[in-house]
Structure formats: C-alpha cells, structure tokens
Amino acid sequence: MTSQFTPRVFSGIKPSGGLTLGNYLGAIKRFVGMQGQMETVYCVVDMHAITVWQDPAELKTATREVAAGYIAAGLDPTKSILFNQSQVSAHAELGWIFNCVARVGWMNRMTQFKDKAGSNAEKVSLGLYAYPSLMAADILLYHATHVPVGEDQKQHVELTRDIAAKFNHDFKADFFPITDPVIDGPATRVMNLRDGTKKMSKSGESDMERINMLDDADKIAKKFKKAKTDPEPLPETYEGLKDRPEARNLVEIYAALNDMTPEAVIAEYPGAGWGTFKPALADLAVAKLAPMSDEMRRLMDDPAEIDRTLMAGADRARAIAQPILEKTYDIVGLLRG
Ligand code: AMP
Ligand code: TRP
C-alpha cells in the first residue's frame, strides 16, 4: 500500500535530558546512514518532551543540544530537513485529528505509557497518554514511508499504522501510507553499562550507567573500563553470548561503532579476556565519539546559528506538511474558507 507514496524518512528525538550512546547508535547514526538514499526529515520533538515536566530554560538548551548532536554526527541540514516540532503547528493539529481516530483501548495497550506512568497513572499528564497519537501525526504529516527507531519504539510505529489504516477506512480515502518501522543493525537496544537487563536511558540514576554524547574522552574510557561484566572471557562464537546480557551489550556496541556484525567482533576477539577487550572498546569509542562531542560543544557555543538552522528547516517542513494537513481537514469535512 505504501508503493504509491514517494519514499520518505521521518524520525525524531525528544529534547529531555542529554543524548546518550543509545540515541546515537539506535537512532542518529542510522538517520545519517539513510541520508542521500531518499528524502529525510529529522525532528527535535519538543512537544513530546513536555509530556513530562521540563524546566523552560533547560528545554531550550536541550533542543539545541539534540540539533547539535544530529549535525555533529553527520546530518547535513542542506540534505535533510532538520527542525524542531513546535515550529510546525500542523503536528499539533493533525495530532488532534488522530486523537479522534485512535481508540482508548489502543492507548491502554501501550507498554511505554505503562512503564512511565507506573503506579502513578492518575497523576501523569493527559499528554503522556496521548503521546503515541502525536507521534503518528509527526510521521503521517509527511506521508513518511520509513521510520528508523530503536526497538523500544516499535509498538508506537505499529500504532501509527493502525491509525493510518483506520483513517483510510473510515473516510474511504487511501490517503495515509502504512509506514514501515526500520529497526536494524546491531544496536537497536543499547543496554545500561551497570545492568545489562535495562535499557541505557537519559534518566537512569547513575551517570556511570550511560555514555552521554557530550562526555569527553576521559569519561568515555573510564565508563567502559568500569562497565559491569561477568567473570567469563568472551566466547568463541556469538551464540555463546546468549545468556550474558552485559557481555553481549559490549560486543554489540563495539560492532555498531565499528560498522561490523557482532559475529565479526567475536571472530576478531575469540576467547579474549576483559583486560584485552575493554581497553580495545574504550579506544574505539573514544576515537569515534570524542570528535563528535567536541563538535557538539563547538556548535553549542553558537546557539543563534543552531536556531537559524532549525528555523530554515521548519520552513521546508511546513511546505510539505501544510498541504497534507489541508487535505486531511478537507477529507474529515472541516470547512475551510
Ligand atoms: P528518545 O530519547 O526516547 O526520544 O529516543 C529517541 C530515539 O533513540 C528512538 O528512536 C529510540 O528508540 C532511540 N533510543 C533511545 N535509547 C535507546 C537505546 N538505549 N538503544 C537503542 N535506541 C535507543
Ligand atoms: N517517541 C519517540 C521516542 O520516545 C520520539 C518520537 C516522537 C518519534 N515522534 C516520532 C520517533 C516520530 C520517530 C518518529 O523515542
């Protein structure tokens, strides 16, 4: 069904806290890889960030930091459309339409909401609950056919497909594409360096459990050298990592950083002890990440330039989004003058 639509990529990252290695390997690095293959639209999703409390001044800084992370990692704002969501009001407008398409029962099945709300479900914002319908709007506002994301976002992209299908069915219009999630490569779920059963996230308790994209060379090396492992050396085959979450995570990070498969990493270090593998991983990570964190800091020194880039990107985004929103209003029967 997507065939009638021009291939187009859309993805986004929330400006809530700093960027992590999970964001880099699970999202940004893959965004950069898709640039040039088809039209690419990348967003700093600030309207998603405010579904939980954000300090207003810090939100602006975090928005610039995500933009700087994108650019430092190789995203070229002349090749991709790069902007922050709130500058294109059509996201919120289409989000409302989709609130009227999505069913409460669908939202109740969203595992991320359950995880985030926990036992506090009565007190979280209504926005946090409606969040997946705004995400569907982000994607479908551009008729995006491909959405690169980490594993944790799979269910939200599936919901986006359900919303598109229900809209098309209810209004008898083959208008929205059925978007494909793109979840590939060795690092679609980068784990916490202190507990290999938990996802690396911006908001974990200890800074030692994650690599931040703004960490300098010393910090990156130290965190990898102190990462939790089990006592066994690396196995002789990849299958040997099966029930060893910490070891597998470090091998997968190595693979993703060095553009190789985890199997090839094991073939390079069969039976290696941690005294060999950890320093090799630390060196590789510093070589790949430290120049990027330096570049991010350089970009952040000129916030006005980042703001100009985001504003120019928003103009280009609006040019695609506005006609799709107008057509949606028309299909729904909303009268326009
Ligand atoms: P967020 O920081 O939640 O806005 O996530 C932005 C993107 O980064 C999404 O595509 C996530 O799936 C991806 N991402 C975040 N954390 C990780 C992780 N630990 N491993 C892989 N991908 C991740
Ligand atoms: N929900 C995503 C996350 O938490 C961020 C996001 C918002 C997104 N809108 C999107 C990702 C559209 C892909 C496409 O990671």
Image (cartoon, rainbow, N blue to C red):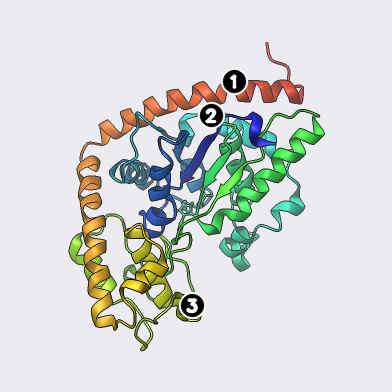
- For image coordinates 28% across by 76% down, the residue present is 277
Disc 1 is placed on an element classified as helix
Q: Quadrant of residue 43?
A: top left
Label 2 vs label 1, nearer the camera = 1
Residue receiving disc 3:
239
Which mark, residue 89? 2
Question: Nearest the camera: 230 or 192?
Answer: 230
Three-letter amino acid code of the residue under disc 2: Ser
* Residue furthest top in the image: 337
Estimate how packed mark 1 is, as few (under 14), some (14 to 19) or many (20 or more) residues with alpha carbons within 10 Å.
Answer: some
Three-letter amino acid code of the residue under disc 1: Pro
Residue receiving disc 1:
323
Estimate how packed mark 2 is, as few (under 14), some (14 to 19) or many (20 or more) residues with alpha carbons within 10 Å.
Answer: some
Residue 216 placed where, x, y %?
A: 21, 59
Label 3 close to label 2 by CB (< 8 Å): no
Q: Earlier in the sequence, mark 3 or mark 2?
A: 2
**In 3D space, how far apart are the residues under numbered discs 3 and 2 (Cα atoms)?**
48 Å
Three-letter amino acid code of the residue under disc 3: Glu
Label 3 vs label 2, nearer the camera = 3
Residue 209 placed where, x, y %?
A: 36, 70
